[in-house]
Amino acid sequence: MDDRQIMENLLLTEKGVCDLFLHGALESATGSVHQAFSAALNDALCMQDEIYRKMSQKGWYPSEKAEQKQILKVRDKYSQANAQAAGSGR
């Protein structure tokens, strides 16, 4: 296994950890449990970001810059969906 595969596995694992901590925070029954999961989620998100940045620096996780037109299109789509949901009492 080369360095890139190791980093990809780390990133995938960290994303899974973030998902688990998020659900733990959402489903927690007490404030202290919620706070513990939230703190763990924040730490995991920071670690995920660090892994992503290192991979990106090495060219292992390329990303494209979105055009402003695309951003506005998606924003408008979800703004309209939210307005419709609010109007229907959802």
Image (spheres, grey):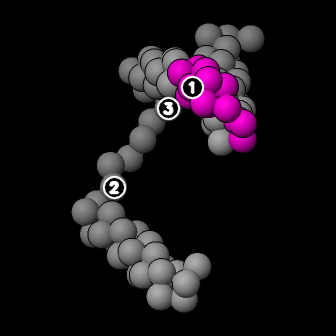
- Quadrant in the picture for residue 37: top right
Which one is in front in this view, the residue at disc 1 or the one at disc 3?
Answer: 1
Looking at the image, do the residues carrying marks 2 and 1 touch, with CB atoms under 8 Å apart?
no
Label 2 packing within 10 angstroms: few (<14), some (14-19), many (20+): few
Q: Residue at x 54, y 88 (%)?
A: 88
Q: Is residue 26 left or right of residue 46?
A: right
Q: Residue at x 33, y 55 (%)?
A: 66
Name the residue tied to disc 3.
61
C-alpha gap between disc 3 and disc 2: 16 Å
Measuring from the top left, give residue 57's x and y in whole percent: 39, 21
Instruction: Report the magenta stretch's main SS.
Output: helix
Q: Is residue 79 left or right of residue 24?
A: left
Name the residue tied to disc 1.
35
- Along the polypeptide, which appears first: circle 3 or circle 2? 3
Name the residue tied to disc 2.
66
Q: Is residue 8 magenta?
A: no
- Span of residues in magenta: 27-40
Which one is in front in this view, the residue at disc 2 or the one at disc 1?
Answer: 1
Taking 29 as reference, is 88 above or below it?
Answer: below
The C terminus: image quadrant: bottom right
Kind of residue sitting beneath label 3: Tyr
Kind of residue sitting beneath label 2: Ala
